[in-house]
Image (spheres, coloured by chain):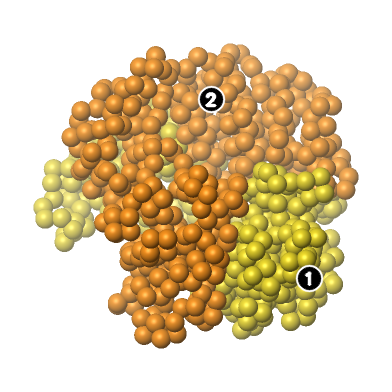
Chain colours: A yellow, B orange
């Protein structure tokens, strides 16, 4: 069953607000077995709204609208829906009661604008809005369902979860759609695709695969469709199991999570601690690690050793190595990791030293050259990487790759095995 | 001149990825004087792409596509564009050279898939992609311009800024649209709006103002439209000058730049240095500061003192204060700043200590309680803030607010004056 999403608001089309509603709604619809066919952002204009709905009705049976329903601007959407569906606004006592009870304790008196929110199109089924004053309107029209919801994400989300998705499921029998995500690191997209050619050719017809690249990793998404959940799940599992012999240790997760979450879970489970020594990443590793709530259980902190004298003074890196090998070198990055491990008294320490760019590159060490190191109870691992010429991406890839290496180590790979990845 | 954006990718319509490209592109187009009429997300399907482009051509003269251009099989955009524009793929030697030079040092050999990226539609103008391997294709077709770009945000952004916007401006004479941004900190949106009521009422008709709130600050954007650049600029300047007497020191910039860029310029000009001591921000201050190219000229580094024993051991915070006042206290945050300034030997040091959440709050110190401190040649400044309950936003606001305070100090405000802000 095909669905479409229409988000209404000038703010979306001048770039003032990123439309996060469409992705959130798409995921919920997809989980419920509805296929989202298109998502469209349009202006707060009657003509734009009418055109977009009419076009969507030509392609889909479910059309979900968000936005254009506040107490000041709602006129356009509500009046436009009346014109489009040949009906008129009527006063609805129950909605007024809902608005009153929602505003109780929040405002002294409800005003004319709030009272106007109880006017709804005669042919719609009004749905209560437990978290706001804007009405939710459900229309059955020429075999399609059109629902108009508020654009405030929290109001839309509550409405979708508690009212719209259950009603849609009841009205339309839906197909099962399941996804399996596999996170792969350190293999460029084109190389991975070549490795998977045969595997892809053998995919059953009702399974499909997509490559979603992100800095330093690829999210491989396998989608299965069918009528029976157990059958689709089983097919997905078989196909997914076929990836391990091909990609091996370069798979770092079968869940669609951030590497810092996997790392946090592993460290917490083992009761072990971590420190960082950051040069080119400048705080990014610490930032990623501490973006996980509860990270204080395993992350003790670190040293941002941006200047060479800090590497020497705080992390005990030898001056002779800084002089002779340079800051971006194996000798220095390994001493940084060891220095942080000792100074902070942790089980593990990760270190970065590289040329983030855009300036600072040489023929020997071009922009993007990054040394990563990990000090662990087993010893020290280090490796040189080349992460390209964009500063922002270099920093992100350096930090994430270091975290991934520690995940692999915590999962049981020795330092020698990690160097093979 | 009307423009439309079409973002291509199954991942957008199952909610795996939020479409941030549309908002970013809308803002750039708007800044350049093009009006975005509609933004549509569609599947990686030939029919969907063809339909969406044909429909968009009925409404707009500029159609910008992102996504569907990687080297793998799920990308069918290129073939579809050939069908739609009645042309065929031809091999382009120059693109192959670009792909080769981009991949040099990244992969051992370029493979068949990479080679395939040098096949482009015969009638398109291929545009070099300096940051990736996917080609950028510009079509002039029936009076419209259709441009296909990669979906990876960093690649799309570089392309838009350096190639597409300048070419569109050259091709289409646009009205003059000028923006003046004023960055205001530490004043809530509703309060600022009240302060500016009279100022807003006196705005000339061809000037408009928008409030763009971001964590810890508000970007006030004044937009002027007209046919003559000098006239529009002069009107904008007059109106902008009227803000200073109303908002005063809570304005921190008249450029739409990041606080870390202003800070970097000031430190570079003065030849002074900076260190950080981060607890609740966990590396975010360092990350923001080092996101500016050339920051190694003034940023020496810092200590991420997440655990209390690191605050004590590395930054010399007194154990008795940690015990009696707690880590989130004036005594501790001031000693952190002083400790970092001494350890790293800098002119200034910024420190943070707070409860980022979601757990860890108490009745005394609820989630969002953050102490910021700054050690400077003049002495130590510190202040307690309340940054709300969302972890990510707390961290961002803490880091940015600390940086803003240092900017104000470097601009000449004394510690006593900063405490009044």
* Residue at figure coordinates x 84%, y 26% from the top left: B93
Q: Nearer the viewer, residue A65 or A350?
A: A350
Element type at marker 2? helix
From the viewer's perspective, is B197 left or right of A44?
left
If the image is split into quadrants, where does the C terminus of chain A sit? bottom right
**Residue A264, image x, y percentages:** 60, 73
Does residue B212 appear anywhere in the picture? no
Q: Chain of mark 1?
A: A
**Residue B175, image x, y percentages:** 43, 17
> Which labelled disc corresponds to residue A381?
1
- Quarter of image, res B227: top left
Does residue B209 appear anywhere in the picture? yes
Give neighbour class at mark 1: few <14, some 14-19, many 20+ (Cα, 10 Å): many
- Eyeballing the image, is A49 above or below A398? above
Q: Chain of mark 2?
A: B
Extreme right residue here?
Answer: B109
Instruction: Name the residue tied to disc 2.
Output: B56
* Residue at figure coordinates x 50%, y 66% from the top left: B341
Marks 1/2 same chain:
no
**Residue A52, image x, y percentages:** 44, 31
Element type at marker 1? strand
Give neighbour class at mark 2: few <14, some 14-19, many 20+ (Cα, 10 Å): many
- Eyeballing the image, is A93 above or below B398? above
- Quarter of image, res B395: bottom left
**Residue A136, image x, y percentages:** 31, 48
* Residue at figure coordinates x 52%, y 61% from the top left: B346
* Residue at figure coordinates x 62%, y 36% from the top left: B158
Q: Nearer the viewer, residue B390 or B320?
A: B320
Q: Nearer the viewer, residue A150 or B153?
A: B153
- Eyeballing the image, is A323 above or below A302? above
| Separation of residues labelled 1 and 2 (CA atoms) | 54 Å
Tags 1 and 2 in contact by the CB under 8 Å rule?
no
């Amino acid at each position: 069953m095909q669905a479409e999403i229409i988000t209404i608001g000038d703010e979306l089309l001048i770039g003032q607000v990123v439309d996060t509603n469409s992705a959130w709604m798409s995921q919920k619809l997809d989980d419920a077995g509805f296929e989202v066919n298109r998502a469209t952002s349009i202006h707060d204009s009657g003509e734009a709204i009418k055109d977009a709905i009419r076009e969507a009705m030509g392609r889909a049976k479910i059309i979900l609208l968000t936005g254009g329903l506040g107490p000041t601007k709602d006129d356009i959407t509500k009046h436009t829906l009346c014109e489009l569906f040949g009906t008129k606004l009527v006063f609805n006592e129950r909605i007024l009661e809902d608005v009153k009870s929602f505003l109780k304790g929040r405002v002294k008196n409800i005003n004319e604008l709030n009272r106007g929110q109880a006017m709804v199109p005669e042919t719609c089924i009004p749905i209560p809005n437990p978290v706001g004053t804007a009405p939710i309107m459900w229309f059955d029209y020429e075999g399609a369902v059109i629902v108009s919801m508020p654009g405030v994400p929290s109001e839309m989300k509550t409405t979708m979860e508690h009212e719209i998705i259950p009603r849609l499921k009841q009205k339309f029998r839906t197909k099962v759609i399941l996804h399996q995500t596999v996170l792969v690191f350190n293999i460029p997209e084109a190389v991975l695709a070549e490795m998977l050619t045969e595997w892809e050719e053998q995919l059953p017809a009702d399974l499909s695969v997509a490559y979603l690249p992100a800095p330093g990793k690829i999210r491989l998404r396998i989608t299965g469709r069918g009528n029976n959940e157990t059958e689709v799940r089983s097919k997905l599992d078989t196909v997914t199991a076929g990836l391990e012999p091909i990609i091996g240790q370069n798979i770092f997760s079968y869940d669609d999570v951030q590497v810092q979450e996997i790392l946090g879970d592993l460290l917490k489970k083992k009761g072990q601690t971590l420190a960082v020594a950051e040069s080119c990443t400048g705080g990014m590793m610490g930032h990623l690690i501490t973006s996980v709530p509860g990270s204080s259980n395993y992350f003790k902190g670190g040293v941002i050793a941006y200047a060479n004298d800090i590497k020497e003074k705080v992390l005990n890196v030898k001056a002779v190595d800084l002089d002779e090998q340079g800051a971006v070198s194996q000798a220095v990055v390994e001493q940084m990791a060891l220095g942080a491990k000792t100074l902070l008294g942790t089980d593990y320490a990760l270190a970065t030293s590289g040329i983030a760019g855009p300036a600072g590159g040489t023929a020997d060490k071009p922009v993007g050259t990054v040394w990563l190191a990990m000090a662990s109870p087993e010893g020290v691992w280090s490796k040189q990487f080349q992460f390209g010429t964009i500063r922002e991406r270099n920093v992100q890839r350096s930090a994430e790759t270091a975290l991934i290496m520690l995940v692999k180590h915590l999962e049981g790979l020795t330092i020698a095995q990690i160097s093979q990845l």
